[in-house]
Image (cartoon, coloured by chain):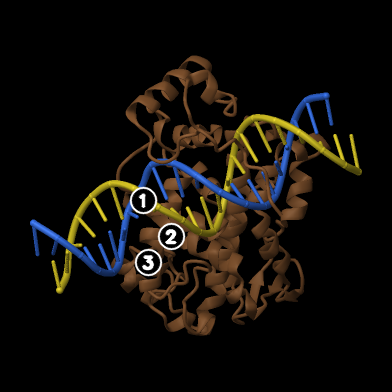
Chain colours: A brown, B blue, C yellow
Amino acid sequence: MVRTPCCRAVGLKKGVWTQEEDQKLIAHVQRHGEGGWRTLPDKAGLKRCGKSCRLRWANYLRPDIKRGDFSKDEEDSMISLHAIHGNKWSAIARRLPGRTDNEIKNHWNTHIKKRLVKKGIDPLTHKPLLDGAAKLSDHPETPREKTSVHQEEDDHKSKDNKSSSGSSARFLNRVANRFCQRINQSVLSDIIGSGSLLTSHTTPTISASEYERSTSSSSTPTSSNILTDQSINVDATSLSSSTCSDSSDIFLYDDIFSDIEDMTIFSSRFSSNVVSHDGEEFLMLDGSCLENTSFMRELTMILQEDKMETTSVY
DNA sequence: AATCCATTCAACCGCCTGGGT
DNA sequence: GACCCAGGCGGTTGAATGGAT
C-alpha cells in the first residue's frame, strides 16, 4: 500500500538545519506560537516539511530544553521509568523535565541499553538475561533490588536482601503495602498536579499505624507465600471507580489510569485467594509473582526509592 | 596521513490517534 | 460512520565524528 506523504517532497530541503533556518523557525514560533506546523514553512519562509519544523523545534530549538550529558539521577529515573512505560519515550520524557523523547531514546539505545546488557539485564524486560527469575535469589545484579546501572555501591546491601523463605513474607508484605501506598500517592500527585479536582473523592491511603501493623513481626505469617491483606484493598479497577465518581472525571483522568494499567495486573493478583490465618486476612501469593513483570518493576522502584532501608530490618 | 570501523544523535519516515466536518 | 487533517509517536537512517590501525 502506498501512503501519501505528509508533505510534498518536491523542492523541500532535507537534512541538517542551518542557523538561518533555525532563526526563521524561532522567530516564527515566538511570534505566532506553536502549532499550525503544516502551514508554518510557507509562512516562515522555510523550504521544509511541517513535520520537520515541528521536530526541529521540539527536539532542539525549544528554550526549555536541557542540553548536555544525562546525570546519574536522570539515568536512574530513565531506567525506572522505562521499567514502567517501556519504549514509550514521550511518557518518559514527560517525567524528565528538559529532556526530549528523541534525546532519551537515543541515550537509551546508545548508552543505557548496552550497560544493562553488559550487566546481564534484559533492557526490554528489566529481568536477568539468563535463567530469569530462577536466579533471582543469587544474582547480585538483577533488578530485583534495583533497576540501576549504578548499583555496585549497594552490592553489600543487596546481598543482605537475599531473603530466606522465612523473611520473604515480611519482605513481600512490606513491598505490597508500599505498592498500595504508591498507587494512591501516584494518583494523588497526578491529580494534585493537574488541578486537584478530585480531592474530595480519592481513595484513602494507608495509615501509619496500619503500615506498622502490617510490617511488624508479630503479625507476620511464617509461611512465605502469605501476604497480609490489611491494606491491600486497592484494585486499580475499584480505584478507578472510587476515584472518579462520574463519567466526566473518568474522561479527565483517563491518562492517569492508563499510567497504572500495569498495576491492575498486580492488584488483581492480590485480589484473589484471600485466606484466614490467626484471625487475620491474608492473601495467597502466587509464586509467579516473582515473574510478574509489573510486580518486579514496582518492587524495583520501591526498593530504589527507600534506599534499601530494609537492610537493617531483614 | 590515510583508511577503516564504530559510535552518536539529529532528522526522517511511516503509522496511529483524535478532532472536526 | 466515513473521511480528512494535524499532530504525535516510535523505529530507523545516515551524516558527522572520533578512535584504532
Do pointers 2 and 1 mark residues of a single chain? Answer: yes
The residue at which mark 3 appears reads as A114
Q: Report the Cα–Cα distance between label 2 and label 3.
A: 21 Å
**Chain letter for mark 1:** A
Q: Report the Cα–Cα distance between label 3 and label 1.
A: 18 Å
Q: Residue at x 50, y 57 (%)?
A: A82
**Chain letter for mark 2:** A
Q: What kind of residue is marked 3?
A: Lys
How many numbered discs sit on the rendered protein? Answer: 3
Do pointers 3 and 1 mark residues of a single chain? Answer: yes
When asked about the image quadrant of residue A79, the answer is bottom left
**Chain letter for mark 3:** A
Give the number of the mark in front: 3 or 1: 3
The residue at which mark 2 appears reads as A304
Which of the image's four quarters has the N terminus of chain A? bottom right
Residue A206 seen in the figure: no
The residue at which mark 1 appears reads as A73
The local secondary structure at tag 3 comes to: helix
